[in-house]
Image (cartoon, rainbow, N blue to C red):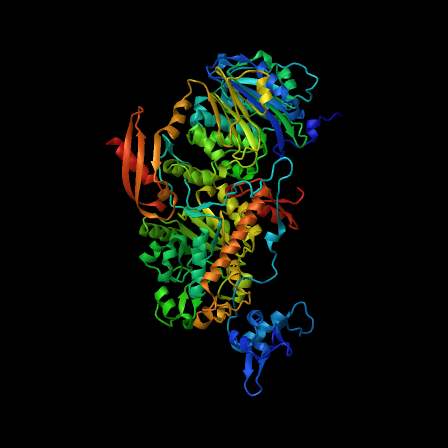
């Protein structure tokens, strides 16, 4: 009997496989859709950064006709798994449409699973029964299927977006899924260089949950710390990959804890303590609290990631910048990639090109995104705050402190500010912030 | 010690050619092993009195002394060892409980030595701590599940936290069990290092209160030295339920050690025995512990984290879960190799479990209950070097306590005679002539040196693993592999075997 290669090897989740990679991402900030050809060109140029053992794409805005339905892309090992999964889906969702995901025959792609696509609406009654909100309900269903139904794996579960991935070089994967035929406003792509041969399609990137997708280059050394933390919040790390863990971190912090994206970035690639010591006292108090509470979510070790979501993407390096990442802008387009050449091939003369520093995010979102407003708050609320640094920086000194500067009140009117505090510095800054607020209201 | 049937454990060899009869050894030995014969004008030694503390050897200007284990053996018997026989002689002679000092010295497996640490190769770069920042800063205290941030501003204050420059603290050693100078050395070093010193149940001497920011004050079953000023004087409050060296029993500081200073600091009459009961008589159950925790928090206006320290015993995981839910901010687990000033020998050598297992079991349990992130976990009980700390943190600790290592840095030679009060190194004694042998400044420098060296070693190991902040190692058991352990042991430790 012929045994398929994928059946002989351990799947991701049964073994931990580190890998190196190429990543690329493009967004049109006006939300205008464009075909997958550019992203395919960009990732294909970095052929040498992958080894044919995994490639994939995430595309946003590709299903406008079903934009309010959850689009599930599912890999099945056999029809039995498909039957069981469909029974499950029918119990928990109204399936509005489904089809076999269109593919081409490509020489570089073998061992394909059975791939189906479903557009589904959660059943209201079931959501009530489980006492969850809609997103948590879908997350629960996805985790249930992926961890409990053997031979079934949901690779994509967001709205108006989809993940396409396989074992093979990214250009072959694109050909296989006919990505040149899709149109979206934001694309990310990945070429994988695993240090082992898993031969399992589910292990390729992007990794997805709801509308989060991650493409990632690197091997995080804090994996087990990160994993254990998010598992306390109900996530199941079934794949044992860094990418999966990072996706859940974003989901937990942004969607469930309601933190702004720039704060989340400060969790994942926190500033160093020596940098925090030099911040203005208000930001310092905030960063300190972030590191105290979310220290276990600091992603340590080399990485460059592109986190895609419905509003756009965030590209980020580890705080030492141990992986390459380049960004560029041209008109309404923002590009990020592992190599500058991968941008130049599709945009020969960008308006600006830059190399983001370690821990400094590239946040590229649609112009109408809510995130634009959030971002402004953290860094722009207080302007030109000059503090008597000597006193603040010298821990252990008690007594009067003079704070002078300007405060921006809502609407941008700035007031001069000059006040003396009598403050036990060891209790740190929150009271000061309250005091500032009072002065603001005078 | 001169029980009828006992023979000397050690033999003192004096090189007559080198010895000038200067009598330094006579002055140095508090146990009276050396004496000067006035008529013959020579110094002689009594082997039976020697405890092998090395004091005379270190101070002999002529290098004339050597101490050796007495080669005298009983008839070979795997069951009735020298130790077993001699212990019976002692008890037959005195009718008393056998006492001992320092931690369990029996050859139980030391699991730290069966755990190996990972390093990066190729797929992940190692980080050079000489060129890149490497962070050891650690915060202990209760953490909320999430932060509320609006408009770039924290909406809720964090509960109080202990800020440590490295994940190490000096564990509880009371003034009484150790000398004032030893306490001062620990407090000075903790302040200089940005870590914590712990008063133990010895009260907080008024002269040391200036080190309060780096002091944890302990509330134990005898409540010695506890009043509101004491609670407010430290950075945190530790409720001591148990101690690794003697789980389940209390403490006893004999009256002869209770001089004027100890008496004033412990708030007990001069020369009285200080007896700490086995349990706290207001804590007979977990809900009583909750009341004490909150009484202390109320008294200090919720400004001080509260630690609860227990000995590692069989059901440790469930107990710690209860403690976390009772409101403790920091849980301290003290393993069965932890040191002590005095403990009944049978208890020290037979009660409790290794801290490696206890720590792994507690961390796993709190994680499975989803509450590990809310509290901090500290472990102690024979942390001997920086690698032990790295392993402890990877198993799940936030920080470690060191006691014996700190004493050794100050000069302790592990002769295990602390309970006699005759410590020749000026550490475990209240005899003013002996105590003044320990210069607090010199001892403090040695402590600072030790931990500075350990910090550098930890940074090297972290960098090797490709990690640049200690919090990324916490509970990161993938960084550990077991060697020479069976499946069940690996399973409890939650680590893979080397090669897996």
- Can see residue A212? no
Image location (x, y in percent) of residue B92: 55, 76
Image location (x, y in percent) of residue A207: 56, 26
Q: Determine which quarter of the picture holds residue B280.
A: bottom left
Image location (x, y in percent) of residue B237: 39, 53
Residue furthest out toward the left = A442
Q: Residue at x 66, y 41 (%)?
A: B500
Q: Residue at x 57, y 31 (%)?
A: A323
Please determine whether, in this image, residue B151 is positioned above or below residue A161: below
Residue furthest out toward the bottom = B39
Q: Determine which quarter of the picture holds residue B139.
A: top left
Q: How many marks?
A: 0
Would residue B63 be found to the left or right of residue B191 on screen? right
Please determine whether, in this image, residue B493 is positioned above or below residue B79: above
- Can see residue B470? yes
Quadrant for the N terminus of chain B, please.
bottom right
For the residue pair B183 and A326, the one nearer the viewer reads as: A326
Would residue A334 be found to the left or right of residue A49 on screen? left
For the residue pair A55 and B324, the one nearer the viewer reads as: A55
């Amino acid at each position: 009997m012929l045994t398929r290669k994928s059946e002989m090897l351990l799947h991701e989740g049964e073994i931990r496989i580190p890998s190196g990679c190429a990543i690329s991402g493009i967004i049109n900030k006006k939300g205008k859709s464009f075909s997958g050809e550019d992203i395919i060109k960009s990732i294909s140029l970095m052929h040498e950064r992958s080894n044919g053992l995994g490639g994939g794409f995430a595309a946003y805005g590709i299903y406008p006709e079903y934009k309010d339905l959850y689009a599930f892309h599912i890999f099945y090992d056999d029809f039995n798994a498909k039957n069981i999964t469909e029974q499950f889906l029918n119990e928990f969702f109204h399936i509005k449409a489904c089809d076999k995901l269109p593919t081409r025959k490509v020489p570089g792609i073998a061992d394909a699973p059975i791939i189906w696509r479903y557009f589904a609406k959660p059943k209201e009654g079931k959501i009530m029964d489980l006492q969850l909100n809609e997103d948590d309900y879908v997350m629960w269903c996805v985790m249930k299927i992926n961890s409990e139904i053997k031979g079934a794996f949901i690779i994509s579960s967001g709205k108006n977006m989809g993940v396409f991935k396989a074992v093979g070089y990214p250009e072959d994967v694109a050909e296989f899924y006919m990505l040149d035929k899709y149109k979206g406003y934001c694309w990310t792509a990945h070429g994988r260089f695993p240090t082992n041969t898993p031969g399992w399609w589910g292990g390729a990137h992007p990794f997805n949950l709801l509308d989060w997708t991650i493409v990632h280059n690197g091997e995080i050394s804090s994996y087990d710390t990160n994993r254990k933390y998010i598992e306390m919040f109900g996530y199941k790390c079934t794949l044992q990959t860094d990418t999966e863990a990072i996706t859940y971190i974003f989901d937990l912090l942004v969607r469930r804890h309601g933190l702004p994206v720039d704060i989340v970035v400060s969790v994942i690639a926190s500033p160093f303590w020596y940098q925090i010591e030099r911040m203005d006292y208000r930001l310092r108090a905030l960063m300190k609290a972030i590191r105290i509470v979310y220290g276990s979510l600091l992603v340590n070790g080399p990485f460059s990631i592109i986190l895609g979501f419905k509003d756009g993407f965030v590209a980020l390096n580890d705080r030492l910048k141990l992986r390459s990442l380049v960004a560029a802008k041209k008109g309404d387009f923002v590009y990020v990639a592992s190599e500058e050449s991968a941008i130049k091939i599709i945009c020969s003369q960008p308006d600006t090109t830059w190399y983001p520093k370690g821990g400094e995010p590239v946040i590229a979102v649609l112009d109408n995104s809510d995130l634009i407003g959030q971002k402004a708050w953290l860094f722009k609320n207080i302007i030109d705050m000059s503090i008597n640094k000597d006193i603040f920086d010298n821990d252990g000194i008690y007594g009067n402190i003079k704070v002078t500067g300007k405060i921006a009140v809502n609407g941008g009117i700035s007031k001069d500010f000059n006040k003396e505090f009598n403050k036990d510095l060891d209790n740190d800054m929150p009271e000061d912030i309250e005091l500032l607020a009072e002065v603001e209201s005078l | 010690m001169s029980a009828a049937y006992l023979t000397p454990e050690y033999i003192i060899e004096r090189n007559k050619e080198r010895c000038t009869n200067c009598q330094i050894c006579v002055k140095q030995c508090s146990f009276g092993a050396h004496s000067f014969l006035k008529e013959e004008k020579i110094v002689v030694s009594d082997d039976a009195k020697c405890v092998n503390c090395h004091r005379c050897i270190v101070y002999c200007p002529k290098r004339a002394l050597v101490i050796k284990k007495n080669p005298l053996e009983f008839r070979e018997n795997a069951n009735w060892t020298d130790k077993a026989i001699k212990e019976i002689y002692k008890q037959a002679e005195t009718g008393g409980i056998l006492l001992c000092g320092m931690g369990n010295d029996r050859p139980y497996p030391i699991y730290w030595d069966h755990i190996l640490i990972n390093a990066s190769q190729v797929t992940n770069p190692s980080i050079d701590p000489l060129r890149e920042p490497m962070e050891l800063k650690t915060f202990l205290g209760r953490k909320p599940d999430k932060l509320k941030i609006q408009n770039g501003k924290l909406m809720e204050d964090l509960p109080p936290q202990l800020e440590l420059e490295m994940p190490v603290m000096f564990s509880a050693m009371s003034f009484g069990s150790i000398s004032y100078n030893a306490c001062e050395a620990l407090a000075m070093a903790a302040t200089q290092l940005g870590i914590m010193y712990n008063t133990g149940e010895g009260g907080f001497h008024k002269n040391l209160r200036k080190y309060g920011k780096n002091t944890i004050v302990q509330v134990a079953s005898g409540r010695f030295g506890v009043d509101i000023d004491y609670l407010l004087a430290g950075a945190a409050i530790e409720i001591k339920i148990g101690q690794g060296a003697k789980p389940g029993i209390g403490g006893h500081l004999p009256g002869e050690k209770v001089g004027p200073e100890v008496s004033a600091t412990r708030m007990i009459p001069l020369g009285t025995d200080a007896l700490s009961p086995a349990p706290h008589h207001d804590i007979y159950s977990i809900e009583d512990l909750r009341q004490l925790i909150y009484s202390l928090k109320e008294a200090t206006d919720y400004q001080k984290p509260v630690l609860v320290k227990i000995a590692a015993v069989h059901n440790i995981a469930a107990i710690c879960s209860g403690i976390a839910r009772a409101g403790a901010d920091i849980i301290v687990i003290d393993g069965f190799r932890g040191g002590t000033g005095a403990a009944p020998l049978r208890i020290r050598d037979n009660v409790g479990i290794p801290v490696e297992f206890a720590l792994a079991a507690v961390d796993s349990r709190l994680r499975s209950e989803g509450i590990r992130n809310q509290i901090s976990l500290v472990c102690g009980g024979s942390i001997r070097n920086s690698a032990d700390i790295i392993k402890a943190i990877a198993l799940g600790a936030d920080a470690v306590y060191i006691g014996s290592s700190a004493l050794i840095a100050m000069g302790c030679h592990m002769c295990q005679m602390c309970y006699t009060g005759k410590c020749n190194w000026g550490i475990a004694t209240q005899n003013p002539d002996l105590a003044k042998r320990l210069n607090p400044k010199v001892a403090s420098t040695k402590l600072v040196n030790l931990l500075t060296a350990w910090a550098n070693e930890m940074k090297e190991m972290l960098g090797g693993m490709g990690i640049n902040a200690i919090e990324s190692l916490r509970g990161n058991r993938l960084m550990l592999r077991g060697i020479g352990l069976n499946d069940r042991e690996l399973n409890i430790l939650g680590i893979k075997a080397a090669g897996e």
